Amino acid sequence: MTPGRIEIRVLGGLEISVNGEPVELPRAKKGRLLLAYLILRCGRPAERAHIAALLWPESYDEVARFNLRQLLRGVRKDLGELGARMVASDATELAFHASDCWIDLVEFRKSLGVNPHGAVELYRGPLLDGLQADWLQDERVRTDMAFREALIALTESSPSKPHQNLPEPLTSFVGREREIAQVKTLLKQTRLLTFTGSGGCGKTRLALRVAAEVVGGYSDGVCMVELASVLDPLLVPQMVGAALGLKEESEEPISTTVLRHLKVRRLVLVMDNCEHLLPACCNLVSDILKHCPLVTVLATSREALSIGGEQAYRVPSLSLPHPAKVASVAALCQYEATRLFIERAKLAKPDFTLTEDSAAALAHVCARLDGIPLAIELASARVRSLRVQDISSRLDHLFQLLIGGDRSVLPRHQTLRSLIDWSYDLLTDSEKALLRRLSVFAGGWTIESADGVCSGNGIPETEILNNLTSLADKSLVVVEGTEGGTRFRLLESVGQYARDCNRQSGEDELWRDRHLAYFTSVAERAEPLLASGEQIWHDRFEAER
């Protein structure tokens, strides 16, 4: 037997050390699985035929047993002196002699129900993390559940008032009752919920509202991490640590300190404005989900984080009246967009009053601004010097009209143009080019139309769909399902921005001509079918009108 203290760790990845020195594990994957299986049995022998069947389930019995003999020989050689611990009581059984070894799983099980803090400290991650086998899954789930129960017992043993660092709102919160209810339900079903949507659609405000309402359901409360002003991805862990009130330890990375702190916490971590730091945010959030099972992450980003277990939630625009069906001032107040305009207009001009004469103009303003809260707030500030009707008549020049926002917020939230500049600058060159070209469509398009009009000049037709999907994922293109199939469109503000960029690029006339040529060709092909009464072509041209 090998002298000295032997420590075996299976919580997390498999590790073996003798007197503190790591032992090199078997090189073959099945060799590590064999060793892990015998260690989990804690010295109890297993039948060789059963082990062979586990490792080679699709092989004939004789072949599987032969493979096991060969594998066992290699494992013993790889382990050196420790290989002698893989013993056989007879020719039919096999075991790993571990009676004098310290095994973290054994100590973990002893601590459960007696010393939950000790059990939590021993847990480094999922059982035998990195190894995959059907026989391992049930034991891994049981161990994870035991760790979660120990965590709950630990947090409940020291109750305290939930902590929260949420900023106090400076203005009223309007509407969103349906969204709040949906999100609170989703938070009970997932540990990573990401709000997506266009810039200014209210992702941050909704996250703050929801976090304030659920803080009492988490023993360690809610922690808000504001990332909007962070430009260096390496600072993401530091920002999370600072929000949690942690001090950096010189002997370990701050990310390790964060994970150790969150490992025993039950809280909601709100990570706001992740879109420009996606790789760094994804790495840290993935580690948190893996090592901190009682932490729920609520993220906001113009595109999803796209990591395992994520539930994306697209924050919709505020509810809108139909501009052509405005009945009265009272009817307008039933909609979130118009209520927001009225409330913010009264902040800008306390004597502001909506009249029957201006009701239709307000409905038109909110509809042209697509119900986007930031755009509506910027427009409402104009009532200091303009009537609602005057604001409505100037909407063809959004970027000259919607300026002069709250000076206390980031510059990109002070004007509509700077808000879209931020999103545009995060695009690849081909995504920027496609967005500019799409501005030639007046009321939306199909993927076939985008292929026909926008391909070429650096963007092959085969790449149009991928770039279009990416623009939709980044909340710059709206996807709508219709009876005739999927259609796409640009929000009014994004469309005006893209048209401006197209003119500045000097390619506006080129893509307008391409648009004209494409639909002229479509019309020529459809003419005989239209004459014969083919309804599908009537429907298509109605949609493209």
Image (tube, helix red, strand yellow):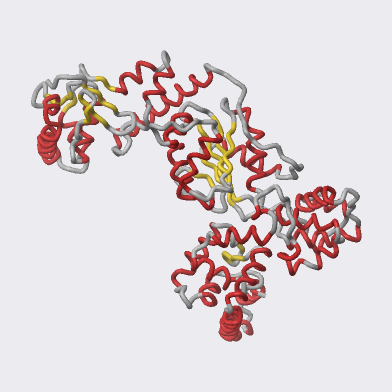
Residue 75 screen position, x and y as percent: 14, 34
Asked if residue 310 is positioned above or below residue 327 in the image, the reply reads: above
**Image quadrant in which you'd find residue 85:** top left
Q: Quadrant of the N terminus?
A: top left
Q: Can you give x and y, in whole percent of width and height, for residue 190 in the image?
A: 52, 38
Residue located 64% across and 57% down the image:
419
Q: Residue at x 12, y 41 (%)?
A: 63
Q: Quadrant of residue 393?
A: bottom right
Q: How many marks?
A: 0
Seen from the viewer's position, the closer of residues 326 and 50 is 326
Task: Give percent across and percent down for residue 316.
Answer: 65, 52
- At x 70%, y 45%, the residue is 176
Q: Quadrant of the C terminus?
A: bottom right
Asked if residue 466 can be seen in this view, the reply is yes
Residue at horizontal 35%, vertical 31%? 140
The location of residue 27, given as percent across then percent down, is 18, 40
Residue 318 in the figure: left or right of residue 270: right
316 and 238: which is toward the camera: 238
Q: Of all residues shown, which one is farthest toward the left?
A: 91
Q: Which one is in front, 108 or 524?
A: 108
Query: In the picture provided, is 219 more to the left or to the right than 282?
Result: right
Task: Tell me if residue 480 can be seen.
Answer: no
Of residues 193 and 58, the one nearer the viewer is 193
The outermost residue toward the front is 250
Q: Is 251 placed above or below 169 here?
A: above
Furthest toward the top, the residue is: 114
**Quarter occupied by residue 398:** bottom right
